[in-house]
Image (tube, rainbow, N blue to C red):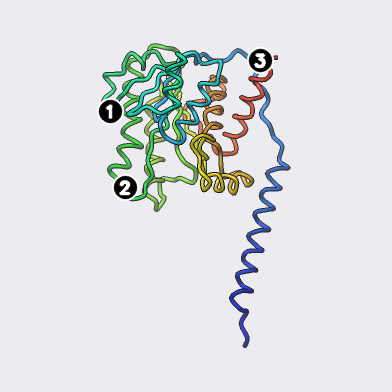
Amino acid sequence: MKFPRLKTILLAVFALFAMLYIGGAVALALKDDPIAVFEGPTATYETIAIFGASGTAGDGILKAALANPEITKIHVITRRATPRIEKGIASGKIQMTLHMDYLDYSAVRQQMADADAVYWAIGISSVGVDEETYGMIHVDFPVRFVADWTNVSDKPGISFHYISSSDISEDSSAMWAREKVRAEQTLFELAESTNLRVIAYRPDYIGPTDEESHVGQDLLYWFFAPVGAAVKAEQIGKAMFEVTARGSEFENGDKIGTRSIVRYSNAFDRRQVSVQR
């Protein structure tokens, strides 16, 4: 019996992958389901705080915040400055606080009390990191913050926006996936019966801002984006602001995936255009 050559098998696999990829891209392109522009009074979020602004996702959130006319003051809580942070400080829109201990927020209570919304983008890759360290950064850091924030803030409708991840479950074999779920569940539970709403964002691949990206990252983004498996960091920021502005339309515990992040980002852009007319 003659078996197919390896080259034939590889070509068949490649052809099947290409068909599935193109089919997924076409299906996504044909699925035109834009979110209607929000026309009601927006929830207040003139003063915000961003944690993790020196990282990939945080830099995109910060870039979007600096361009957002609805935001007048940005508290950046960070371990180090970046060119974008320094530019924002020079403009007067950013107030930066250097902070090192993310299990103790006593030094930033004034900033916490001042914030209408907090955008959390602190995180690390799980590669080469033990479970205890990963859990401390992705679970303990934000949980300790939220617990302290609800005690400090007396504002009636504050919101915490947490970058989680796609494809996570509590029974996953991957440590990082279990820890992200644990973070979400703990944060949601902390916010119950308080003045806080916690919203989790579950993106797939996050493409950096244009200023921070390199060729490899651009290639990854343009490969995954057509099939709805990638989002730009700046789009996450815009989606977060749109979700914040829509207020009670979102409840504590809501989870927003990649496709919805893109849709709410686009809705934010359309709303800004309509406001400027």
The residue indicated by pointer 2 is 129
User: What residue appears at the point 37 percent right and 14 percent down from the top-left corner?
Assistant: 113
Q: Are marks 1 and 2 in contact (CB under 8 Å)?
A: no
Query: Three-letter amino acid code at disc 1?
Result: Met
Q: Where does residue 156 sit, x and y in percent of width and height?
A: 44, 12
Q: Earlier in the sequence, mark 3 or mark 2?
A: 2
- In this picture, residue 131 sits left or right of residue 208: left
The residue indicated by pointer 1 is 100
Distance, label 1 to label 2, CA atoms, is 20 Å
Residue 232, above or below 192:
below
User: What residue appears at the point 31 percent right and 16 percent down from the top-left corner?
Assistant: 109
Distance, label 3 to label 2, CA atoms, is 46 Å
Looking at the image, which is closer to me, 69 or 197? 69
The quarter of the picture where residue 33 lies is: top right
Query: Three-letter amino acid code at disc 3?
Result: Val
Query: Three-letter amino acid code at disc 2?
Result: Val
How packed is label 3: few (under 14 Cα within 10 Å), some, or many (20 or more)? few
User: What residue appears at the point 58 percent right and 76 percent down from the top-left corner?
Assistant: 6
The disc placed on residue 275 is 3
Q: Where does residue 54 sit, x and y in percent of width and height?
A: 40, 31
Q: Are marks 3 and 2 in contact (CB under 8 Å)?
A: no
